Amino acid sequence: MISYQERIKDLTSSYGNWFHDDTLLERGKMTSSLYPYTNLFSPITINKTKIKNRLIMAPMGNISMCDESGRPSEKMISYFTERAKGGVGLITTGLIPISYGIDNSIIEKGDLTYFPRIDRSRTTFAPWRDIAENCHSFGAKIFLQISPGLGRVGNPQCVVNMHKFPVSASFNPNYYMPGVPSLRLSDRKLKKIIKKSGQAAADSKAALIDGVYLHGHEGYLLEQLTNPAFNRRKLGKYSDWQRFGIELVKEIRNRCGKNYPIMYRIDLSLVLNETYGEKMSTVKSLKKFKNERTVKMTLDYMKNLVKAGVDIFDVDLGCYDNWWLPHPPGPMPPGCFLEVSKIVKEYFDKNSILSNTGIEVPIVGVGKLGYPDLAEQALRDNSCDMIMLGRPLLSDPYWPNKVYANKIDEIIPCIGCQEGCINEFVEGGHPQCAINPRTGFENIYEKEFPITSNKKKIAVIGAGPAGVTCAVTAAKRGHEVTLIDKNDKAGGLLISGGVPKIKFDIQNYNNYLSNLINKTSSKYELIYKPNTTATIENLKTENFDVIVTAIGVKQIIPKLPGYDRDNVILATELLLNKDLAKDCKNIVVIGGGVVGCETAYMLKSEMDKTVDVIEMEPYFMNHVCTANRGYMIHYLEENNVKLHNCTQLKSIEEDGIIVTKNISKTVPDPYITWAPLLPENVVNPLAKEIISEEKEIKIEADLVVMAIGGRPIDNLYYDLIKANIAPEIYNIGDSFKQGKVFEATKSGYLLARNL
């Protein structure tokens, strides 16, 4: 019989090629074959608390949704209230650190923070009570996620800003700057953290919050203390890696009584050894972590946590050092961790593990479950007891209500980009959503559009995300709108972007855009004109009051020697016609951004080509969410795609390309995924200077694919301005500045709300 550890190894080894199975691809579609969703909308009891359905909002971090003292803001209150309105049964907050004064990475200069707090003073209680009462008004319960701290995955800027080191269970390298040590916490300080956790739980209960949720996964401080990968203490009571977590739970149970729900988030395995193999012995910042907690050890720990008082678990895999696992990006398979929750359920059933109240311990399924039929089937198959949704409830807070009413085609489907929900606050913002411009702004923009008192005749040119969002929003406000696009379907560049099999979430979104246009056209004054080119002449005859250009970009081919050869094509051309590469063996992709890397991955994983990727900058996929970037680069390496950074194209030959490559040993390893790229405004004082040592080399290639980006197509906009063709003329989306879907939808939405 295959062991639990072997099952996990087989699961993780499939994440790079799962899409060859058409059955798995079908699971990632927004279908309604299993309606009515009787399992999803059946109640469940956690301890003594009844939840109205099986849907949980995941703990998406609420960074900067508070004032600098940690007091939750109106932004956060409205954000959670919106999800309660949408029909979810249980809401969990983002992590709330409680180890101020001990974990130096969670505080800013001047004793300020960008994390919400519940421990500072009574001034923080009132908004938490407001949040709880608002959630209760719509039938949702809410749990507060308590975190003993960040430890080695906390911001190392505390070294520069406050001359204090990060902390951890043992001496561990900091995740963001491996050269910065995280110092070992004393037993006395750990005991203090346990006391603080108990107080935070008691305060949560007093603030009308329905339960607490312990952040014990992903390599945060609680994980660091309860996993021998990070806890290598030889002396003291916490050298027993289970003890800190068990004492923590007992303290909360003691402070809050036997009937206050305690939830625990845990990873069944870090799977670092499975991810990195031999690198665990050769990479300095990974070497210490080889002795990670096994699946068997985790299950035993979970059993003991139940004895201590835990009522419910959600279970995943991975940590910061393989961040695409706990934060599965678009290319990860639908329901990627159902096998994980199934293993736990099997173990609990086999060992008759019951909670302190004598009932079964619910096991929550997590990881890309925002597809209604898949979520329902997971419950029917007994793979889990509840379904946790994070990003799907940011893209559409009303996912539960729409699923219950069988309005699946109206759900705004998450595209897995993680640009608004995660990368935005990494870069300095707060949680948002790339395809839902209201997320994080619910306190400013009401769900219902303000009907205009000044009806206008509007033309929107371009049916990409910016254009469709603008046109639909304007039409719903009561304007007369014409949406014009040269393509036969909506999506803009996302049409080609959705071609690789791993981009199935983009295909769902493109289908949503088409459905949105059709539904809006049937109810409002929206005329859609596909296969139509907008010109000054045909626009002039319509006498529009407003013209909005959202035309996108023109892809670039640099005019280097050989640029006009027959073996040179654009990545967008290849994506729309894969036969262009059918007879080619060796292919080189110029440009190491998202499009270039995803195209290279498709060429190798779907078409079995030999692929090289050229990038002139030191890093591939810079400014892309760490999880998305990590997944792609890891599996490019697994598939033997050669990445050449600090390499510049010089000329294109009939049988290949000539480049100058910096071959200095100071050039960063392009395949590093166990450490992130820092935002450019953060200085790493330990970073090594890249020395130039260039060498001209030739790379053989039958086909050269250009993926270096594009220039905004803004000529029509400026021609319209010059011709003074309408009283109001605007330019949005990529035709204003090439960016991401995140910027495009926001620009279309905000403009249309104000027309």
Image (cartoon, rainbow, N blue to C red):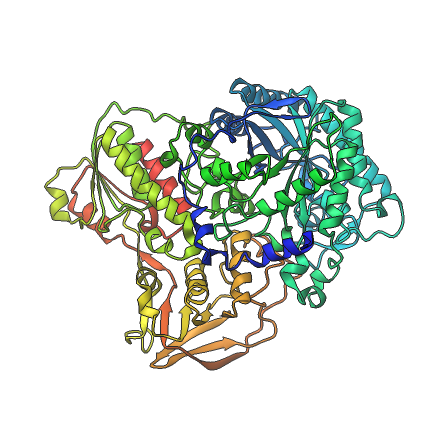
Q: Position of residue 262 (x, y in %)?
A: 70, 30
Q: Nearer the viewer, residue 753 or 494?
A: 494
The quadrant in which residue 566 appears is: bottom left
Q: Position of residue 620 (x, y in %)?
A: 50, 62
Residue 654 horizontal side relative to residue 278, left or right: left
- Regarding residue 587, the answer to whether it shows in the image is yes
Q: Position of residue 95 (x, y in %)?
A: 64, 37
Residue 116 horizontal side relative to residue 309, left or right: left
Question: Above or below — where is 739 with respect to 199?
Answer: below
Question: Above or below — where is 651 with respect to 239?
Answer: below
Q: Nearer the viewer, residue 381 or 728?
A: 381
Instruction: Give the number of callouts.
Output: 0
The quadrant in which residue 404 appears is: top left
> What residue is rendered at 36% in x and 25% in y?
448
> What residue is rendered at 27% in x and 38% in y?
517
Q: Nearer the viewer, residue 657 or 696?
A: 657
* Residue that sits furthest to the front in the current view: 1
The quadrant of the picture occupied by the N terminus is bottom right
Residue 257 horizontal side relative to residue 518, left or right: right
- Regarding residue 165, the answer to whether it shows in the image is no
The quadrant of the picture occupied by the C terminus is top left
* Residue that sits furthest to the right in the current view: 235
Q: Position of residue 325 (x, y in %)?
A: 59, 51
Question: Above or below — where is 247 with respect to 175?
Answer: above
